[in-house]
């Protein structure tokens, strides 16, 4: 019985350690899942804000391009009409140099730093580039967001499955611990009963200068007592 008690105690301690380790792993997985869900929520909020900002930027850039194109057309029409008017004012008495100058289309302030039309064309190009770059940035951000969500969702699924398996294993381990504890208590009770009975027999087994016949009789009583103890233990095992 002593060896049984020791074996049961060792098994119980082993299972208790396993249960504690599983509990720690489950807690870590639960925290990791919560952190992933938090990161997903934050990424989604940022993505929605970023998407709205990019959409507004593209819309503004398109509207600006239309406005600049209209302004450029108005100016070109104005310069064209002004050039026609200057040609009509030519009375034929201008010098060759003036005639050459008057034959060139009127460009107003275009001669200064590329002119207003040239400046508007630069602005138009800037807005077109802004639209293109913003659209590309939006596509790249959307792709990165989808990739992160897919990977993190898969990670959550894997961790959730692992948590479920470890939880089931811990429940089984805890049930085993409860069974071992009960079995250990019963075995310890049996061992305590046997030891107590043995202590009662010890004084009767001592040699106090008895005769041979008396020692034989004592020996037979001892054997009978041991048989009775064995019978008691067997009855407890059957119970």
Image: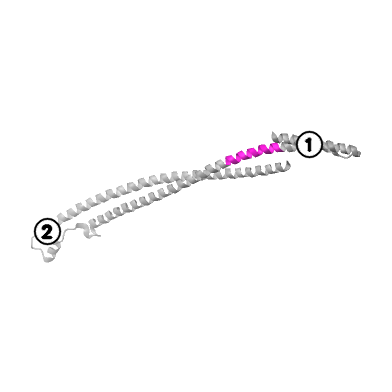
- Residue visible at 30% across and 48% down in the picture: 60
Image spot of residue 165 (x, y percent): 54, 43
Along the horizontal axis of the image, is 56 left or right of 114? right
Image spot of residue 230 (x, y percent): 76, 37
Along the horizontal axis of the image, is 9 left or right of 150? right
Q: Which colour scheme is used?
A: one colour
User: Which image quarter holds the N terminus?
Assistant: top right
Q: Could you say which is closer to the camera, residue 143 or residue 172?
A: 172
Q: Is the magenta stretch mostly helix, strand or loop?
A: helix
Q: Could you say which is closer to the camera, residue 111 or residue 142?
A: 142
Rounded to the nearest angstrom, the CA distance separating label 1 from label 2 is 142 Å
Q: Badge 1: few (under 14), some or many (20 or more) residues near its Cα, within 10 Å?
A: few
- Residue visible at 41% across and 45% down in the picture: 44
Q: Could you say which is closer to the camera, residue 204 or residue 79?
A: 204
Q: Could you say which is closer to the camera, residue 183 or residue 28?
A: 183
Q: Badge 2: few (under 14), some or many (20 or more) residues near its Cα, within 10 Å?
A: some
User: Reading the chain from its start, which is encountered first: label 1 or label 2?
Assistant: 2
Q: What element carries label 1?
A: helix
What range is drawn magenta here? Answer: 170-187
Image spot of residue 59 (x, y percent): 30, 47
Q: What element carries label 2?
A: helix
Q: Is residue 160 above or below residue 116?
A: above
- Which label was assigned to residue 227? 1
User: Would you say the residues marked 1 and 2 are in contact, meaning their CB atoms lie under 8 Å apart?
Assistant: no
- Residue visible at 33% across and 48% down in the picture: 57
| Residue 144 makes an appearance in the image | yes
Along the horizontal axis of the image, is 121 left or right of 238? left
Q: Quadrant of residue 188?
A: top right
Is label 1 or label 2 in front? 1
Give the residue number, with chain letter if any, for mark 2.
Answer: 87
């Amino acid at each position: 019985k002593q060896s049984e008690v020791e074996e049961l105690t060792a098994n119980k301690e082993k299972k208790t350690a396993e249960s504690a380790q599983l509990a720690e792993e489950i807690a870590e997985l639960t925290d990791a899942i919560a952190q992933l869900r938090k990161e997903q929520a934050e990424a989604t909020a940022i993505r929605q804000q970023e998407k709205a900002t990019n959409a507004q930027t593209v819309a503004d850039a398109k509207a600006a391009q239309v406005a600049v194109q209209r302004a450029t057309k108005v100016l070109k029409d104005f310069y064209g009409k002004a050039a026609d008017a200057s040609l009509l004012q030519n009375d034929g008495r201008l010098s060759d140099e003036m005639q050459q100058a008057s034959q060139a289309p009127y460009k107003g302030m275009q001669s200064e730093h590329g002119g207003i039309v040239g400046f508007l064309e630069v602005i138009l190009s800037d807005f077109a580039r802004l639209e293109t770059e913003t659209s590309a940035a939006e596509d790249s951000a959307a792709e990165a967001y989808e990739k992160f969500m897919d990977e993190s969702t898969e990670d959550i699924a894997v961790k959730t499955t692992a948590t479920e398996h470890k939880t089931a294993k811990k429940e089984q381990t805890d049930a085993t611990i409860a069974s071992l504890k009960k079995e250990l208590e019963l075995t310890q009770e049996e061992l305590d009963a046997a030891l107590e009975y043995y202590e009662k027999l010890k004084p009767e087994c001592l040699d106090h200068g008895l005769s041979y016949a008396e020692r034989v009789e004592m020996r037979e009583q001892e054997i009978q007592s041991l048989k009775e103890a064995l019978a008691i233990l067997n009855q407890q095992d059957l119970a």
